[in-house]
Structures are given as structure tokens and as C-alpha cells.
Amino acid sequence: MAPIGTLWGVLRQRQTKYILSAAAIAGLEVDLAPLEVGVTNKSPEFLDKFALGKIPAFEGNDGLTLVEGASIARYVASLAPESGLLGDSVKDAAQVDQWIHFVEHEISAHTDLIWQMLLGYLPEKTYSEQIHKSLLERQERSLKFLEQSINTREFLVTDKITLADIVLAAVIQRAARVTLGAAERALYPNIFAHYAKVAADPRVKDIFEAADFVEVPLALEKAD
Amino acid sequence: MPSVGKFYNLPYMRQSKTVLSVCALAGLELEIPEYKHFEDNKKPEFLAKFPIGKIPAFEGANGLNLSEGAAIARYLAGLAPNSGLLGTTPEEAALVDQWVHFAETEIAMQNDTIWAMVSNHIPYNKGFHTKVADHQMRSLTSLETYLSTRTFLVGERITLADITAASVLQRVVTVTADAAVRSKLVNTIRFLETIVHQPKLEAIFGPVEYVEKALQWVPPKKEKEPAPPAAPKEKKEKEKPKKVADDDDEDDNLVPEEPKAKNPLDLLPKSPFNLEDWKRAYSNKDTRGTDGSLEWFYANFDKEGFSVWRVDFKYNEELTLVFMSSNQIGGFFNRLEASRKYLFGSVGVLGENNASIISGALILRGQDAKPVVDCAPDFESYEYKKLDVFENQEDKTFFEGALAWDLEVSGKKWADGKNFK
């Protein structure tokens, strides 16, 4: 089958994982463009199409240009309704949306901010232990809730993998590389069982790559 | 038209405005139950339906229970494909998604973080504030450029993307996008004004409050440092504690601090008339007759500390179906939530479908209605007339009819009503 479009993205990004996993399960092909981060996406040709210069970025064969990882992934999924990625009904689709939104806003957002603080993407002296702690607490509350919700279900919305499961797995993998060390992960056996199931799916195994989890949560002295 | 479901929300939240706007444009009827934040969302019945425990929350008439404002908005928009709210092709739908996601994660999130910091709900850090504000500014600049050649974000008509962006921007201009910043966002502001003034959306969005100077952090007084120039405190003090829940979170850490300036209504001389006792009497007794609540009222009311008012909707010619007008009253009452301690209301729809009026009575603290009702953005859509229920027979009759739900005005009989208590 011909590729449906071109994706500029780095495999290590959770958002790129969403998109490529969605494509894989949808049976669609997406071309990964050659990408030198910081160079390609700052070039005039790229900025012409994607004004903010951020990745992942998608250009469909019909000229559609899209940014925002979750939106690209949902679009890809919508092209293959029989894949079940958005559930099997309008209600399912709404619940898939709900979980993606929750996971991105209530888990991933905190991981990302902590990462930025630690890896020095902030102006000097912006590391704040209090903010770090506050973000960890918020993330913990969301994870505790999620741990209970996954309990009785195989997958989040239906009996098959949906985009919600993919997004959660990608977000959790990221969290386990930044904020969740071995001790923390042990608090969430259901979440990590879910992660393991998704990451082991033969269709997406290579996209999720090796787990690369941290032993202890990243802290300031370990950065740089 | 039957309601598509119940929508639990706090009306000033941007997500609520988005959902209500979708319903207005999609022609969907939504039921808005009474809701007390931090109370109702902790109850087992609520958590059984919405385990996330957050608002907004939607309980569909078809059994679907949904959390997350954006997911609710998209689902409802999808129920009315002719509305064009999600575009008309999969590609347009993807673009609508993209802009919603962008507005939420690249503008709103930053706004909420900054607001939380300057309000001391998360620890303040100047470098972090700067970084987050810069991030937001880059996003706003990109949006500005995009809007310099467009009226709407996707296609040539209003979509969910525009509604979401407008609800986000309405918040941004009260926190970070001050006069100086706005001078660089001319198209964005024009866009915001266009969307919030769409006829069906105007009452939902309410007025846009433009901040003069971006909110700054004021160190808590107990540190005994001279406070830097404070955030514009002339913003409605009563509204401040409520904005806490804006990030769609029932987080106990965000329990609102009382505004430093006391509500002037709390500074009035103590009154022997207890509004809570009145509300109990009204609820537990018959209104009219011996030992009724009206009898109780006349025996206990304090004319110095409280006043009685007639309230009339100004645009009765716009009213259509009785139950929708009843919902409008409910919505107005929701928006008066901040004044719960100072207000009682009994307001109804009188007449029939397409020939009705909204009219009723308020009992409120003090001698002036405005300080009590102006927490509702749409308070100016109603007229307020002080009543003398002791000396004026007409006023007394009106008042009693409003409370007994048998009021008749110009031949129009009471059809349905709501109480604020």
C-alpha cells in the first residue's frame, strides 16, 4: 500500500509513537522523513508548512498539513475505522477521546514539565524543588486513580487495543524514563501490566523499542 | 426537544463555555443540574458515574458518561454533523482537532500554570514563570500570524476549534495578555471578539475582561516584605476564588483562598434576619396561609439589612420554549453561585411557548442589587426593581406570587420556575 503521507518525528518522542503505532494497527504506511532535529524543523521549507517548527508534523499526500501528535494519530486512526482504534461506536470514540485527554493533561503534562526543568531547558536558576514536588504529587494522584481504573479491564475502552491504550502506554513509558523509578513503578502493577501488553503487541513492538526505564526518578544532580 | 443529557459544571470554566456553545450552535438541549463543587463530586453517586471525579462531567441520556471537557465537546458536536462544528470532511475534522489540542496544550496549559503560581496555588518561581510565559507567547504569535488572513480557524465557518480557542483566549487576556501584549495580537483579539459576540454565544461567554497589566506574583504578606504592585485587584473579588477550578481539577490543593479584600457585603452591620433560616422556612413550609413561609418572612424580615427586588428578563421576545427558558433561569442562577450567602431567588417563566416572560423575585443582602448579582456575567440582561412588600400592595402581591409560584403578569400565568436557595 502506498504511504498516506510523510511524518517528521523522532521515534523517542511519545507523540511519534502514537502516530506510528496508530498507522501500524490501522494497516497504513507513513513515510518517516529524514530529520535533523533543530535543523530540518527550523528550515524555511519546514516553517512554511509548520509555522511553529515543532515535531511531530505530518503532511498528507493530499496536501493536508497537521501538527499536534494526538490529532495526527486520531486522523490516521480515522482513516481505518475497521481497525477499532477509535472503538466500535460513537460512544466508544468519545471514551477513547476522554482517556487520551486525561492521560495527556493529567500525567504527561507533569512529566514533560519536570523533564524541562531538570534538563535545563529553562532559564538559569529556574529549577524549583517545590514545583518539582508539586508536579510529582499531581502526577501521583492521577496514576493512583488510573491504577484502580485499569484493574478490571483488559484495555481501556473496548476488548481490543485503541488509540487510548497506545497513548497511555507511550506516556507511561516516558514517565518511567523520567519520574518513575523502580520503587515508584512497583506501586502501579496494573498500569505497567497494561504497558507491557501494549508494548509487546507484535504490530507496535518495534515502535515502542526497549523500555529504558530509570532505576530512580531523575533529579537535578543527575541532569547534564 | 429532549435533553441529550446532564452537564455538571461550573459556568465560568472555559470548558463549560465551550460545551454550552457547542450545544447552542448544534441545537442540542442540555440539562444543567444544581452542582456544588468539592461536595457533589465527592459523593459516591457522582464517582460511580465519573470515577475521575472532575468537572465538567456529562451524563448522556443514552447512558454514556464522559469526563474531560474537550471530549464532551467533541462528542456533542459530533451529534450534529450538519452544524459543521467538526468541519465537513475527515481532513477538516483533523484540523479542528489540531487547533483544539494546540489551544489547550500550548496556550491554556501555560495560562493555568501561571495563574496557579501568581495565586499561590503552586509555589512561585520567577524563572519558571518567564519560561512558561515565553512559551505561551510563541504560541500566541504563531496564532496571530495565522489569523491575519482568516476569520475562522478551519474553513469558512465557525467550528469547535474557534469556540475552544475563544474560551482559552478569554482566560488568557485576564492573566498574561495585558495591554502591551495585546498590541501585538491585534488579529487574535479581533478573532476573540468575533467569536464571543456570535448572537447565540454572547450570553454564554459573557463580557471579556481585559487585564491592564499581566498578573504578577505578590509574596504572601506574612513574609513582611513590601509587596510589589499588586495584580489588578479591581477585578471582581467575588469571582476570584471560583476561578481556581478553572483547570478542570477537583484538586484539594486548589482550595480557594479568600480574597484579601473582604466582600463589602460581609462588612454590613449584623442583621437579625438569617438568610439560611429563611431558605429553610421556604423549603419546609407551605408558602401561603397560616404558619406559611410568607408569614414567617413578614415576622422576621429586616428591611435595613436586606431588600426585596423584582427581576425581569429584558429580552422576552427571544424566549421560545418554556422549558428552555426555565433552563436559562437555571443557568443564570448557576452563574450567581458566588453570591449564595447573600441571595434568595424565586424566578419563573410565565405564559406559553413563544409567548412568555421571565420574571420573579429576589431577596438579597444590603439595599442594592448590583453588588450581589454582578458576579453573573449576564446580570445586565435582567432589570431589577426594588420592591416595598410592606407598604405597597402591588409589590406585595407580586412578591407573594413569585414565591408561591402562582404569579400572573399581564395575563401570563406562571408555567415553570426555579429557586435560588
Image (cartoon, rainbow, N blue to C red):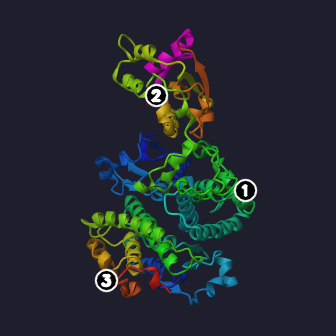
Q: Could you say whether the residue bearing mark 2 is in a helix, strand or loop?
A: strand
| Residue B347 versus residue A10 in the image, above or below | above
Q: Disc 1 residue type?
A: Ala
Mark carried by residue B75? none
Q: Quadrant of residue B124?
A: bottom right
Mark carried by residue B417? 2
Which of disc 2 and disc 1 is earlier in sequence?
Answer: 1
- Which residue lies under the disc numbered 3? A200
Viewer-nearest residue: B114 or A4: B114
Question: Residue B319, image x and y in percent?
Answer: 57, 32
Viewer-nearest residue: A62 or B104: B104
Viewer-nearest residue: A220 or A121: A220
Viewer-nearest residue: B328 or B135: B135
Characterize the local packing of mark 2: few (<14), some (14-19) or many (20 or more) Cα atoms within 10 angstroms. many
Question: What residue is at 44 percent from the left and 66 percent from the top?
Answer: A134
> What's the distance in space between the residues labelled 1 and 2, CA to CA?
42 Å
Question: Residue B343, image x and y in percent?
Answer: 49, 30
The label nearer to you, 3 versus 1, is 1
- Which residue lies under the disc numbered 1? B179
Q: Which residues are magenta?
A: B390-416
Tell me if A143 is positioned left or right of B133 in this view. Answer: left
What is the number of callouts on the image?
3
The chain holding disc 2 is B
> What's the distance in space between the residues labelled 3 and 1, CA to CA?
53 Å
Q: Mark 1 touching mark 2, by CB under 8 A?
A: no
> What's the distance in space between the residues labelled 2 and 3, CA to CA?
58 Å
The chain holding disc 3 is A
Q: Disc 2 residue type?
A: Gly
Tell me if A74 is positioned left or right of A145 in this view. Answer: right
The answer to whether marks 3 and 1 sit on the same chain is no
Question: Residue B211, image x and y in percent?
Answer: 67, 52
